[in-house]
Amino acid sequence: MAKVTLSVIKADIGGFVGHSAVHPEVKAKARACLEKHPLLIDHYVAHVGDDLVLIMTHEHGRNNGEIHKLAWDTFVACTEVAKKLKLYGAGQDLLADAFSGNVKGLGPGVAEMEVEERESEPVVVLMADKTEPGAWNLPLYKIFADPFNTIGLIIDPKMHCGFAFEVRDLIEDKKIIFNAPEDLYDMLVFIGAPGRYAIKRVFHRGTGEIAAVSSTQRLNLLAGRYVGKDDPVCIVRCQNGYPSVGEVLEPFAFPHLVSGWMRGSHSGPLMPVSMDDARPTRFDGPPRVVALGFQLADGKLIGPNDFFSDPAFDNARRVALEIADYLRRLGPFEPHRLHLDEMEYTTMPQVMEKLRDRFIDLRLAKKARAAAGGEA
């Protein structure tokens, strides 16, 4: 069989109600657009919060214009349903008026990998709402570089060679490859700043094969204004030379802090939930992550297994809610509210401009007093 491409493309094209969920009619429209489409082998329509997620398999490779146009046309058709239902923010992630060959740069988030199916090809599709692409940095580091999380790095001879991480600079549009374990300390300098640096892809160093890929689109950089958080997706291959399913899921037992939450301007815990519970409500949150498992079988999507519906993650949810309680009491103060560099697309620039003439430059005032013979 030819190589199979797994494409996960997502967009917020209207929330039900507010920013909390995807309306059933929107999902039904997406399924109708993809059903029995000649370009596809198989598909599954998912959601996380108010984001519609198209999971598609085909034989046309990454960045294929026809596949991307199919996704774009599906989002446009779903936007019409959202407008009919007067859903909130209908079409908000579609930043262009028309498709231009590739959905990258047009708003939707994209994660794609092309693989030659193994005898058994398990994959996990991770989907997050109310956060940014860098939210995957800590989990991907733990999955592919931390032996305290992934014991296979130590005891599985097929993984002992380590993995290579492609890290993107989302501000200057650059990339760099770090090899684990020898480059770990250098890599952590960068991926510990997830607002700017994000892990885009991970490769098996022994085979050079793709191991994981994430979406790294920054909507505010594309639009030049705040239009919602990026709500990233990620694909991870599992087993037989790659981390086990349990090793892929284990990082989410710790609800680490991510940027996003209310109005994309707050830090909050990333709470693992089932797809049915991916309805962020409290302060439009807390941020949610869903993990859907599939077996690829000649390109068919066997599944999903909704992993975070497992009560084994109940304690992670409890901890996330305790963290949410603590942070909410800080209100508009950091570190609950994001630092000023991340407030560029809120009211901060307008407020600064309004008050510009009321700020007194103390250094100039001090020089003026000294020149006048006054107190320095």
Image (tube, rainbow, N blue to C red):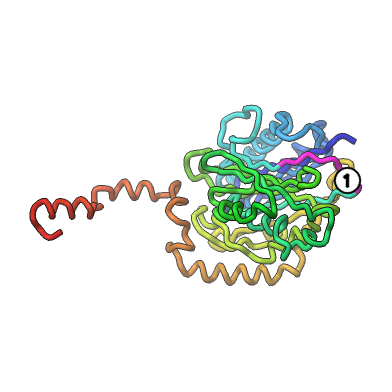
Q: Secondary structure at mark 1?
A: loop
Task: Write the residue at 63% across / 38% down.
Answer: 80
Q: Residue furthest front?
A: 182
The percent position of residue 114, horizontal first and vertical second, equals 78, 39
Residue 122, given in percent of the width and then of the height, sits at: 83, 51
Residue stretch rendered in magenta on the structure: 112-119
Q: Quadrant of the C terminus?
A: bottom left
Q: Is residue 148 above or below residue 100?
A: below
The one nearer the camera, 350 or 280, is 350
Q: Is residue 114 above or below residue 148?
A: above
**Residue type at numbered disc 1:** Arg
Q: Is residue 284 magenta?
A: no
Which residue: 58% across, 47% down?
Answer: 230
Classed neighbour count for the residue bearing mark 1: other residues with Cα under 10 Å, few (<14), some (14–19), many (≥20): few
Left/right of residue 240 with respect to residue 342 in the rendered view: right
The quarter of the picture where the N terminus appears is top right
Q: Residue at x 60, y 58 (%)?
A: 287
Residue holding disc 1: 118
**Residue at horizontal 72 percent and vertical 43 percent from the top:** 8
Tell me where residue 374 appears, x and y as whole percent.
Answer: 9, 58
Q: Position of residue 317 (x, y in %)?
A: 66, 68
Whether residue 62 is situated above or below residue 161 in the rendered picture: above
| Any part of residue 101 in sight | yes
